[in-house]
Image (cartoon, rainbow, N blue to C red):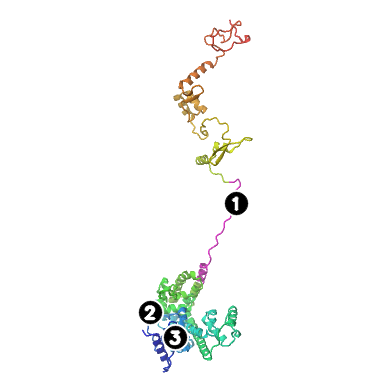
């Protein structure tokens, strides 16, 4: 592959009409030749410059039958160029002197001034055979040429920056836009006082104020006459390139509204032209799935080492659509998918020719604008709910039942705890302490008997026995058991067969002892004891006597007292 110096000399030799004057070469920072774009590709006999086919296929996705678009230069690549030693702008800006730009501009003038059929007839004719027509090729070529002009402006802008830096070195950082920078340089000129220049018609007021303040303190020196002429020549070249660019874009826009009106309404005329050129026309573009449209024109350059030139994801021509560029950077991928799908629908409508005036595309664009605007809306603010109005009566009562009663019994306050929480008026409570902790006993120690307290069951929750079961139990165990059950007598679980007496101390309980006591009491205190004495004579009440005599009783025995005389029974 030929070096850049050989290509540059060959191009200059073919355009200088026999002039053998050699032009200086741009020199990079490392002493090597700086890489400048070859914007004159295709001039001469209309053949493209020799490019390594295998390498070019790696850098761009071009379907079969498509036209390879011009490659856009990266700003960082241009900034690495060193053009201080280049004495003429024509050495780096050769597009104006080349035949490619001039021939394209003349062809555009011919098609613009050529009388032809109406817009509707032209639309039908170009939609039928757009890929084979000469004007379609001119549209694609003109769109690629607009990219070459942008690359040329970047290089000339770098040339002006390097040569005007001795006069105003701070201007480069104050005005980053190439077109505004060139116009500001032309307005400032090479006068000794830079503050007299009028920049109000070129730049915003805030930028003008900053430039005026910086110009009053700059350390720059006026340029020599020869150096200023080089800067003026470069600025004039930028103005000529800008005029050619506007003419080309105006022509492409007017023709794309006839070839693909709906697609142009969605993505813009420039992006639509690039898509048609790289896809091989409307027919080829309509066959591409929407999920692959973003690959058209995507560069496959990979970053190596610590390079920062290609830090972003590879993006295609659809990424340059105004709808995508207007949204935030974090929404670019979503917007690209949304716009790609609608753009393919518009391209297929143009291919079918069902809408020749772009009505469908305009409607889709409005829908996309609303959808992308909705996409960028911030999430709704989380509403803070007010607390509900508290109900009167405090906490809601829980539903009753066996389970609720059990929970209350488990967590409820015991009688012993209630006694501990009470205090007797005028009396000090007892305390129980261990180590450094002391707990008050309240009234828990009042009325202590020394007996173990039996657990008192709640009769309301006790199981109840039916009357038939009570009778049956009474028949089995006797009436004593039935009466004991009716009385609700309960025995403690701590009862034993031992008893404590003051005479013997611990004694075994005799089960028959209580029975004998009950039998003796039953005989003595039974009904009629005070009326009739067993074994007495007649109906004399025991202890009574007739004629003032008492009934004799056994010595040492206790009996009932004698009745008074008035109550004695009469003896017949």
Tag count: 3
- Would you place residue 232 above or below residue 206 in this image? below
Cα–Cα gap, marks 3 and 1: 81 Å
Q: Residue at label 1?
A: 389
Q: Mark 3 or mark 1, which is nearer to you?
A: 3
Q: Circle 3 — which element?
A: loop
In the image, what residue occupies the spot 49% across and 30% down? 492
Residue range in magenta is: 366-394
Query: Is residue 519 rendered magenta in the image?
Result: no
Which is nearer the eye, 402 or 347? 402
Observer-nearest of 82 and 431: 431
Q: Position of residue 449 (x, y in %)?
A: 55, 30
Q: Which secondary structure class fits the magenta region best?
A: loop
One can see residue 460 in this view: yes
In the picture as drawn, the residue positioned furthest to the bottom comes out as 18
Q: Nearer the viewer, residue 214 or 395?
A: 214
Label 3 environment density (alpha carbons within 10 Å; few <14, some 14–19, many ≥20): many
Q: Earlier in the sequence, mark 2 or mark 1?
A: 2
Alpha carbon separation for disc pair 2 and 3 = 24 Å
Give whichever of 9, 404 is nearer the camera: 9
**Height in image: 458 above or below 559?**
below
What whole-number distance in Å separates the C-alpha atoms at marks 2 and 1? 74 Å
**Image coords of residue 529 (percent x, y):** 55, 14
User: Up-down: is 381 above or below 439?
Assistant: below
Name the residue that disc number 2 marks: 56
Q: Is-magenta flag for residue 389?
A: yes
Question: Badge 2: how crowded within 10 Å, few (<14), some, or many (20+)?
Answer: some
Query: Disc number at residue 26?
Result: 3
Question: How busy is the neighbourhood of tag 1: few (under 14 within 10 Å), some, or many (20 plus)?
Answer: few
On the picture, is 380 further left or further right than 147? Answer: right
């Amino acid at each position: 592959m030929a070096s850049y110096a050989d290509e540059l000399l060959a191009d200059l030799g073919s355009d200088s009409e026999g002039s053998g004057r050699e032009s200086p070469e741009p020199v990079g920072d490392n002493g090597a030749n700086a890489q400048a774009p070859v914007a004159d590709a295709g001039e001469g006999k209309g053949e493209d410059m020799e490019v390594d086919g295998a390498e070019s296929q790696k850098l761009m996705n071009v379907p079969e039958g498509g036209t390879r678009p011009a490659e856009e230069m990266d700003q960082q690549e241009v900034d690495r160029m060193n053009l201080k030693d280049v004495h003429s702008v024509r050495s780096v800006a050769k597009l104006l002197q080349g035949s490619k730009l001039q021939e394209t501009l003349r062809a555009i003038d011919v098609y613009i001034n050529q009388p032809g059929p109406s817009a509707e007839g032209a639309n039908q004719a170009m939609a039928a055979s757009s890929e084979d027509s000469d004007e379609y090729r001119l549209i694609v070529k003109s769109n690629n040429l607009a990219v070459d002009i942008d690359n040329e402006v970047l290089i000339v802008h770098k040339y002006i920056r390097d040569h005007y830096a001795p006069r105003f070195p701070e201007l480069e950082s104050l005005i980053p836009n190439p077109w505004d920078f060139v116009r500001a340089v032309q307005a400032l000129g090479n006068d000794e006082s830079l503050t007299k220049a009028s920049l109000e018609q070129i730049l915003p007021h805030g930028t003008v104020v900053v430039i005026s303040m910086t110009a009053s303190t700059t350390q720059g020196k006026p340029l020599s006459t020869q150096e200023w002429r080089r800067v003026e020549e470069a600025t004039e070249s930028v103005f000529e390139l800008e005029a050619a660019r506007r003419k080309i874009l105006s022509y492409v826009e007017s023709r794309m509204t006839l070839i693909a009106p709906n697609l142009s309404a969605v993505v813009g005329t420039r992006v639509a032209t690039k898509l048609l050129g790289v896809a091989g026309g409307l027919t080829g573009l309509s066959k591409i799935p929407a999920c692959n449209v973003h690959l058209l024109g995507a560069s496959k350059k990979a970053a190596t080492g610590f390079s920062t030139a290609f830090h972003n994801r590879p993006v295609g021509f659809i990424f340059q659509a105004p709808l995508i560029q207007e949204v935030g950077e974090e929404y670019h991928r979503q917007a690209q998918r949304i716009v790609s799908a609608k753009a393919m629908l518009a391209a297929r409508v143009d291919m079918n020719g069902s809408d020749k005036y772009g009505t469908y595309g305009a409607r889709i664009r409005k829908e996309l604008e609303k959808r992308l605007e909705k996409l960028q809306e911030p999430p709704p603010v989380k509403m803070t709910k007010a607390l509900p109005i508290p109900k009167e009566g405090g906490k809601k009562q829980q539903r009753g039942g066996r389970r609720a009663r059990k929970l209350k019994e488990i967590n409820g306050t015991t009688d012993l705890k209630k006694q501990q929480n009470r205090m007797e008026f005028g009396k000090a409570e007892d305390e129980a302490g261990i180590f450094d902790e002391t707990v008050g006993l309240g009234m828990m120690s009042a009325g202590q008997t020394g007996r173990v307290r039996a657990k008192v069951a709640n009769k309301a929750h006790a199981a109840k026995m039916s009357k038939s079961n009570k009778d049956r139990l009474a028949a089995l165990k006797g009436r004593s058991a039935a009466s004991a059950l009716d009385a609700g007598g309960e025995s403690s679980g701590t009862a034993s067969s031992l008893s404590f007496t003051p005479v013997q101390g611990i004694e075994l309980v005799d089960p028959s002892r209580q029975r004998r006591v009950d039998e003796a009491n039953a005989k003595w205190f039974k009904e009629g004891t005070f009326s009739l004495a067993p074994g007495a004579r007649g109906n004399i009440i025991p202890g009574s006597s007739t004629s003032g005599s008492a009934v004799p009783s056994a010595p040492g025995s206790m009996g009932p007292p004698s009745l008074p005389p008035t109550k004695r029974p009469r003896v017949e």
